[in-house]
Amino acid sequence: MNARTTTAKTPASGKRRQRATVALLAAVLAGSVTVAGCSGSSSDPAAKTASGTASGTASGTTGAPSSGSGTGSANGTTQGGADSLTILFSGDDIPQSAPNRAARVPGTRNTYDFKPLLAAAKPYTSSADLSICNMEGALSPDNTNLTVGIRHHGPREFATALAWMGYDGCSTANNHTFDAGLPGIGQTRQVMADAGLKVSGPGPDAQTPKVATYEVKGVKIAQLSYSYTLDNFAGGTDTSVPANVPWFKDSMWKLKDAAGIIADAKQERANGAQIVLVSMHWGIQFTFTPTPQMVDTATKVLASGEVDTIIGNHAHVVQKCDRINDRNVFYGLGNQISDQGTNWGFPDETQDGIIVKATFKRGADGKWTQPSAEYQVTRVDRTGGYILKLVTPTSNPKSFERESQLIKGDSNACNLSPAPATD
């Protein structure tokens, strides 16, 4: 089921139509017609056009449901689409007041442009077949009532810039989901849909799908999202929800527990998903080690075989990647864009983040594996206009070395390698 099917009205829309056309021609040449939608991307512009699509629409190449055996894959003879693809995901995108001010267009009161802040990362974030972000806050359709303090409410152009970077969708399940109230949840989803971004997270009512589905190079991918709470202000806790939003419980990690997450993943496989991703907003802020409950949940979820990768956020600092049942859990990816830093008494590491680009391959038996992944260290230049920079061993050795160590952990269990240096 789709999170959104609204056609993107962004500068990327022409690029996506090109991809859909190529995918249609390829399908005709193969003797079958595939309906395709929004696309992921590749580092080579020509390859982007031919690489496939990221869409929630039905497709003749969508794989069959899994057998429920816990393999997380249907028989290879019934699955369609490519046998290899890349999926990119990153740290928290937080529309705090200082980055919002930095993005405001001079001479205007409520027009913003985040592209100059994020442009340096675009070549990398647009280089994967599917790119997923983490939106930590609400978005305003008319750029009013923006962020005050720790109520995160960003301008609509924040979503436009993320789509321009190459992102196809975002997780929205986090402790700032409710920052603009219940109306703000629906408005945020609409702003993101208008920008061409899909949403994985709770909606303004119980009927709104909380799953984002993508079709990438003929492969159906589902993204589920959960948070320890969805509400910092209106009575929500780790294990309770405000009375007027009872459906929030379906997106709360500690209420779902591992069994509930596994059940949701099984349902997505029954709906045809060949790869299932789970975004988790969890852990303790500003700590570099996952909690025992995080480790226990990740172990159970990945051992089931129904979830292929766990994408962790919320700690605002990078935590290690671990490999369980030949699948990866990235416990924490730090921040991508925020105002956090030593100015607030937070660790310097809160200005850093990790972008991961993971390669997925399908074997002759139809099972998808993750043989490799690379990471790109980033840093927000707070004093230089909140510019997001790609960090290399020569541009910022301190950030590069410490974040590399954090994401790899003591053993580099996920066999991660740094992205090729760009300087």
Image (cartoon, rainbow, N blue to C red):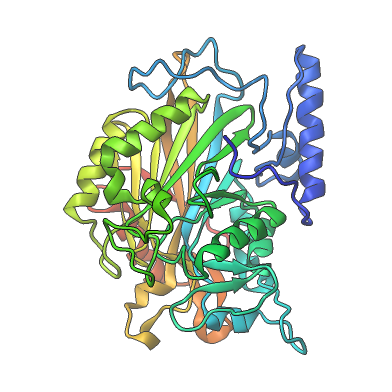
Task: Tell me: residue 7, above or below residue 313.
Answer: above
The single residue placed furthest to the front in the displayed view is: 243
The quadrant in which the N terminus is found is top right
The quadrant in which the C terminus is found is bottom right
Q: Specify whether 407 is left or right of 172.
A: left
Residue at (27% x, 35% y) in the render? 259
Residue at (22% x, 52% y) in the render? 410
Residue at (42% x, 78% y) in the render? 340
Based on the displayed image, in which of its 4 quarters is residue 11 positioned? bottom right
Residue at (36% x, 84% y) in the render? 342
Q: Is residue 324 visible?
A: no
Task: Tell me: residue 423, above or below residue 89.
Answer: below
Q: Is residue 406 visible?
A: yes
**Residue 89 percent across, percent down from the top left:** 49, 51
**Residue 344 percent across, percent down from the top left:** 37, 86
Q: Specify whether 352 is left or right of 85.
A: left
Residue nearer the viewer, 174 or 404: 174
Task: Tell me: residue 166, above or below residue 372.
Answer: below
**Residue 246 percent across, percent down from the top left:** 39, 52
Based on the displayed image, in which of its 4 quarters is residue 188 positioned? bottom right
Residue nearer the viewer, 278 or 151: 151
**Residue 137 percent across, percent down from the top left:** 50, 67
Q: How many labels, in total?
A: 0
